[in-house]
């Protein structure tokens, strides 16, 4: 059935792919974004579509619309982006969640919130299950994002208990793919940009820290399954690819796939509070949603490298000096 769907952060990397899918499925889509870490080029092909509407709006201010579902993705996601204006980041997470939950309550919409593996901080439990409560430094440079997302989760479950809002919370682990901001400073975008330009590949620390990388199409399958999943299942649910790679292995894979002449160098010490290991336990997503990622890191990187080669990177505005 055709639904009216609001996507906050809809012009961003994940949000724009989600809008593409929802519009293609025939839904009536409102994309709400203040374009802080994205640009219209991600959604320009949708602007003339009869099922699509773009609204330039900041989620820290209330927004009213008659909708059936809300995907709440608005928030800077890359460390360089969320640390650029940390007070704004936590306001976006918390006030954005309050405003979208208020809207969901008023119009009885279902709301899916894009939470993060960062709620686990630098984890002492490995792999991370949803039951693990995390190890976050509340006063460190990542706290604006980590604690903002933790508070947003609290709000989701309080609105669910107090007002019976149908909330759905996904904890997204590192996700990559076409339309990542090439200057967002994240490891995949940095390494690919450096490799295709023949620049040094910059490893922070010894490169033995690990991450699990999920291709965007797999992640969006999980998000849609969660939004339309079983009644009464609110999560939180881990969504990510359980393949675990060191950052050095990632660098070597990018150089190999892109046949780059770049050198892999140790560029600077590990940033403060940088998690040493990260890998999702996805048993809950498999059981409740029947979901598992399908795209290997090699295939996903191949597709992402092709996009980086075809995109005009000079058109992307570096929003922060941290790349
Ligand atoms: P992104 O930066 O490309 O997208 C975020 C979007 O939100 C951007 O379009 C940005 O302009 C918009 N935005 C930021 N602040 C806003 C505000 N105050 N009002 C309105 N719009 C605002 O990042 P992404 O990777 O697509 O992430 C999307 C969501 O998924 C985020 O909530 C992020 O925290 C979450 N997430 C992503 C990952 C990942 O690896 N990509 C991992 C964990 C969680
Ligand atoms: N990283 C790196 N070189 C870069 C960018 C990042 O070695 O050019 C490291 C970073 O220190 C971290 C990992 O790669 O250990 C993932 O960083 P990212 O910013 O992509 O996301 P995070 O998972 O830390 O939020």
Image (tube, grey):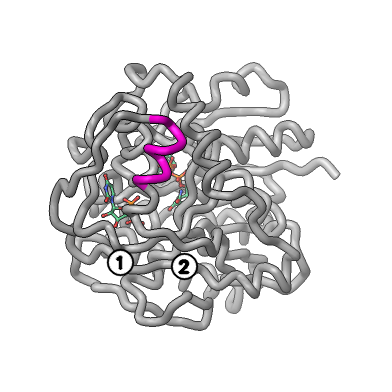
Number of marks: 2
Residue on which the image places disc 1 = 275
Element type where label 1 sits in the image: loop
- Identify the residue position indicated by label 2 in the image: 279
Residue 242 percent coordinates (x, y): 54, 64
Residue drawn at x 35%, y 81% is: 124
Say which residue appears at 55% left-offset and 34% top-offset: 303
> Which secondary structure, mark 2?
loop
Disc 1: residue Cβ within 8 A of ligand 2's nearest atom: yes
Q: Residue extending furthest right?
A: 1
Observer able to see residue 108: no
From the viewer's perspective, is 152 left or right of 185? right
Q: Quadrant of the C terminus?
A: top left
Residue 140, which numbered label?
Answer: none
* Picture coordinates of residue 247, whole percent (x, y): 34, 54
* CB of mark 2 near ligand 2 (< 8 Å): no
Over which residues does the magenta segment extend? 251-259
Q: Is residue 186 visible?
A: yes
Name the residue rendered at 50%, 27% in the picture.
Answer: 307
């Amino acid at each position: 059935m055709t639904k009216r769907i609001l996507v906050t952060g809809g012009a961003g990397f994940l949000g724009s792919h989600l809008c593409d899918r929802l519009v293609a499925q025939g839904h009536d889509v409102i994309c709400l974004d203040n374009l802080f870490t994205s640009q219209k080029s991600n959604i320009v092909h949708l602007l003339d579509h009869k099922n699509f509407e773009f609204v330039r709006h900041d989620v820290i201010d209330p927004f009213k619309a008659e909708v059936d579902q809300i995907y709440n993705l608005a928030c800077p996601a890359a460390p360089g982006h969320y640390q650029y204006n940390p007070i704004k980041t936590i306001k976006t997470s918390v006030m954005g969640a309050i405003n979208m939950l208020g809207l969901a309550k008023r119009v009885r919409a279902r709301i899916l919130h894009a939470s993060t593996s960062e709620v686990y901080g630098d984890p002492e439990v490995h792999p991370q299950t949803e039951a693990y409560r995390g190890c976050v430094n509340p006063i460190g440079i990542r706290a604006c994002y980590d604690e903002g997302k933790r508070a947003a989760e609290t709000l989701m479950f309080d609105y669910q208990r107090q007002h019976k809002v149908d909330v759905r919370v996904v904890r997204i682990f590192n996700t990559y793919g076409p339309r990542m901001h090439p200057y967002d400073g994240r490891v995949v975008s940095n390494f690919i940009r450096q490799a295709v330009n023949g620049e040094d590949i910059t490893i922070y620390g010894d490169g033995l820290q690990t991450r699990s990388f999920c291709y965007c199409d797999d992640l969006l399958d999980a998000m849609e399954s969660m939004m339309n999943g079983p009644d009464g299942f609110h999560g939180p649910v881990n969504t990510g690819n359980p393949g675990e790679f060191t950052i050095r292995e990632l660098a070597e894979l990018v150089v190999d796939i892109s046949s780059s002449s770049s050198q892999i160098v140790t560029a600077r010490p590990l940033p403060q509070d940088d998690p040493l290991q990260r890998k999702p336990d996805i048993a809950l997503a498999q059981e409740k949603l029947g979901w598992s990622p399908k795209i290997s890191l090699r295939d996903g990187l191949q597709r992402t490298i092709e996009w980086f080669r075809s995109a005009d990177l000079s058109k992307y505005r570096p929003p922060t000096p941290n790349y």
